[in-house]
Image (cartoon, rainbow, N blue to C red):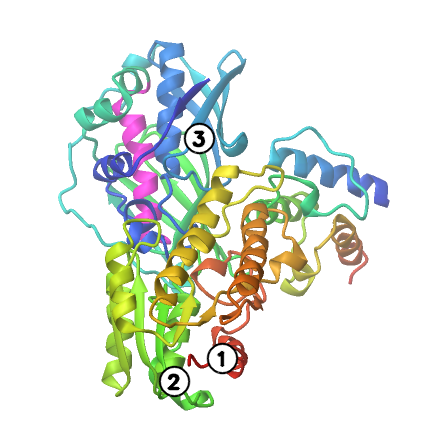
Amino acid sequence: MNHSALLDQISIVIADVLDIDKPVLGMETTAGSFEGWDSLAHISIVAQIESDFGLKFTLAELAEFSAVGNIVQAIERKRNGG
Amino acid sequence: MAVKRFSLDDQSAFADLSHDYNPIHVDPVIARRLIYGQPVVHGVNALLWALSLLAKQLARPTLISDLSCSFIKPIVLEIDTAADITLTAPGKAELRIRQYGNLIARFKLEYLDAGVLSQAGFSTPWPSGASILQRNPEDVSGESMATRAGSLELFLNCAEVDCIYGPDLLTVFGQGQIAEIIALTRLVGMHVPGLNSLFTEIKLKRSSWVELRVLQYRVTDFDSRFQQATIACRSPSFESTLKAFLRPRLIRQAGYADIQAKTARLDVGSHRALVIGGSRGIGEVTAKVLAAGGADVLITYSKGREDAEAVVEDVRSHGGKARAIQCDVLGSIDAALSDFAAFKPTHVYFFATPYIFNGQKDTFSYTKLQSFLGFYIQAFDKIVQALLAVGTINFFHPSTVAIEEMPAAMGEYTVAKAAVEAYCQWLSRNRPQLNIYVPRLPRIATDQTVSILSVDNNDSIIITEYISTFLAESKTNV
């Protein structure tokens, strides 16, 4: 799955959690771009991504999730055995 | 769309109905020190309100086959709370709760309406109250969370339900279903996670009827990264899965003896220090640091009398000088001003503040700005004017690094603090005899900065560095 497909899947999660239309995401998109993306929403988004992709992020990875691109890279690392 | 404002009386009524007496919902004094800085509505109370509105539309006995609830943000009191209901398809509805136009809670419901009156449990009368009334929530640690399991008796006071929500809720959804849903908030708020809970999700499905008089529960997962428990439940009609956080515990500041032992002693033996808002947080630490340096300290509190008395007791029991008086800086302040003037403080430290994390990313509220300004400028100005008359000239009024960082959801707070800086500059220009110190404080670990996600907060003892700078610049009234 390439960046664009991952971004698309993440955008579906964000739309569902934040109850908004499916957003157009870039690697630089941050939580600050969305009104409802606070700490509780962040946890819900992460948990849903973990469930959808069948993986679990470490605390160190979670701490780096300042932009959507960080999430994409963490998913790719995990899928590549990182 | 329906609109209501939840009040503290509504909270008490729902607590009596559900027996969920968690202080974050019903105790304004304790709740002011918890994560939302104020009491918030029980999520299940909002759910039942929304269901009562849906009941008016359905107007026939209805079985819930599937219910998904997301409690997204806290529902605060005395704010217009809007509920809108969308019938998305036959037998399906979505209910949304909003404050300030922002989504606070979302409920997705699937339901059946045929032959329900004969459904087991729909109209079964339940005991109207619990055999044991428990008012104090259990304090469950993260370590013991994963092993928690048990059962809660089911009961329902129908007269109280009718009084709170009107008769349609029970007529349409029946006693059994409502009793089973209400038990969920009691489970989370009082037992698991109990005292430090934050209820975020219900996923409930109709299951084959079982002859139970209880709600059975078992923690199936505890995610230590987020301190989040997943709880599986079984009641007569439903299988449900709940998610709830173990929210951060109350922030306790360092004790006087600790401060004495670990910080450099300030040379303030001749000072009379007035600490406005000294019962907790940075004000509490400031009071202890100054008392440890020998100052005679007068602290004020607004609502937290017990907190203030604990600070005073801590200081006095170790030989320091401190006392406390009540002062609501937005209320009738004249009596307190007389006490302040009689005390003739050499230095004033101003930490009175409302809850600061109440903003929205895309909405600027003039009402919230006015509230901040009422504390930071109006009240401070009254105190300055009153104390100038008795010769007080040294004032510590904290600003914030938020002015540089500009957090997205703290617009009103940040603008108010910028106004504080401008006001203090203006004051200094016109009253050159004054020494007003307005440092931009970093994020410091207090009740106000606690968060579900771990954040980098400075230890509150860092305030000592700012006090030292203030004291170095202090003036002596001649």
Residue receiving disc 1: B474
Specify whether B124 is left or right of B423.
left
Of callouts 3 and 2, which one flags the residue occurring earlier in the amino acid sequence? 3
**Badge 3: chain ID:** B
What's under tag 1, amino acid-wise?
Answer: Ser
Residue receiving disc 2: B258
Instruction: Report how far apart the C-alphas of labels 3 and 2 lie in the structure.
Output: 52 Å
Report the span colored magenta.
Answer: B173-194
Instruction: Label 1: state its secondary structure.
Output: loop
Magenta stretch, main secondary structure class: helix
In this orientation, which residue lies closer to the viewer: B237 or B106? B106
Residue receiving disc 3: B205
**Badge 2: chain ID:** B
Q: Give the x, y percent position of residue B398.
A: 51, 65
Report which quarter residue B441 is drawn in.
bottom right
Of callouts 1 and 3, which one flags the residue occurring earlier in the amino acid sequence? 3
Specify whether B323 is left or right of A17.
left
Q: Is residue A11 above or below residue A50?
A: above
- Disc on res. B53: none
Q: Crowdedness of circle 1 by 10 Å Cα count: few (<14), some, many (20+)?
A: some
